[in-house]
Amino acid sequence: MAGVNGEKLKRLRAWVQNYEWGRSGAEAEVARLLALNTGAEIEPNKPYAEFWMGTHESGPNVLVEEEGEEEEEEEEEKEQQDVGLKEWIEKNPKVLGHKVLEKWGSDLPFLFKVLSVGKALSIQAHPDKELAKELHKMKPNLYKDANHKPEMALAITEFRALCGFITLQELKEVLEDVPEIVELVGTVSAKQVMDIDERGGDTADKAKTALRSVFTQLMSASKEMTTKAISKLKSRLLLQSQLRSLTEKEELVLQLEKQYPGDIGVLSAFFFNYVKLKPGEALYLAANEPHAYLSGDCVECMATSDNVVRAGLTPKHRDIQTLCSMLTYNQGYPEILSGLALSPYITRYLPPFDEFEVDRCVLPKGSSVVFPAVPGPSIFLAFVGEGTMKTGCWEGIVTEGDVVFEPANTELVITAATSELQLYRAGINSRFFHGL
């Protein structure tokens, strides 16, 4: 796989995480991709959560030996077959392009994933760079690196998530309609929210202060009080469901209670926006914004980090104090990206972060598309179908499950074979190169 700059495209063996919230066996897109990418056998009762493409030490990718090369190249590939992508980039830093090297050093600045969510992930946030450095220094066993982790999720199927805090008006309605929350946060804190005049000049600041107070008190409630409040809530909603239709949020809360009985995250769900992405829609998350993915399959891209501060809907370590103190407490519905059409076949998703962008490419059978040379590296995932990739004078077959690293400054022509070819590409945000 030779690129126009003399460097080769590299096929990668991806990494899979089997977190317990993943979908089981063959129903998981992650399991399908794993089997296609590595030849691994799918275990029907095992959860398959995340398919990682990148250099992060918690899920490093390995270069795959190419077939059909010249003999001397074959020998070189054999020597390299267990070489990690990270190590190879460190030895060949020019594949990143000089601007990327200058800004981020000799490592890939983004991590590309596919997620198969079978049950809710934890209520969590990702630290900004300053906090990440501090947490990594204090608790390196929990916070594995010193980087921030802005991220974006692009729905493959319908994808549900909790994301960001609801508006002040919605919060007032929650405190009126959910007495179990008021029991835990106290009437004084609840009144502080209810008394805010939404027409006042300093409403936003007052709302943030009051929200921080009630949310921190809720998340800090004792296990005994939490269990009792959730039990009351469940009984009340089941009774009311016989008299009226429950709201979507109430139904969600009952689902979460089944997945995580007695967990404070069940009640805190009332504080967050309930987002349902259609396939092809994306959601981005800045540092210090609360969220929890709930169900569905998505492509995800983020800065190269695995830092997560959790506080609910999880059996893992919780750092409630850190989470409650780090959040921005911004309120309102998140921006949903529908993508920009670059051509009839390519849609680009541009979050407001330098480290990454994602392209979705759907090629009808027999059609071709050109990905122009860009000054940074890319990773391509062949998601469905088969076709060819061509760079300079080289041409090779790409089939579903293939993951390919493309060096900077390489023009790539992709052609679909006898059926539709779907691909996803992650690369450096193009605004970074244009100084926007």
Image: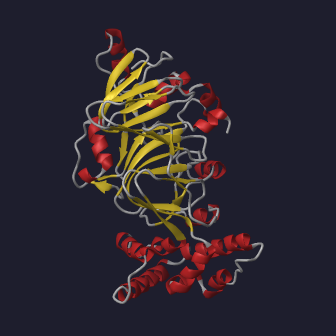
Residue 334 against residue 349 in the figure, above or below:
below
Identity of the residue drawn at 42% across and 34% down: 380
Q: Residue furthest front?
A: 344
Residue 353 against residue 187 in the figure, above or below:
above
Where, quadrant-wise, is the C terminus in this rendering? top right
Residue 59 against residue 375 in the figure, above or below:
below
For residue 421, side relative to residue 151 (left or right):
left
For residue 217, side relative to residue 264 (left or right):
right
The foreground one among 293 and 280 is: 280
For residue 12, side relative to residue 139 (left or right):
left
Residue 223 against residue 133 in the figure, above or below:
below
Can residue 146 be spotted in the picture? yes
Q: Tell me residue 322's x, y (percent).
A: 60, 62
Identity of the residue drawn at 38% across and 17% down: 394
Where, quadrant-wise, is the N terminus in this rendering? top left
The foreground one among 221 and 139 is: 221
Q: Tell me residue 226's x, y (percent).
A: 47, 79
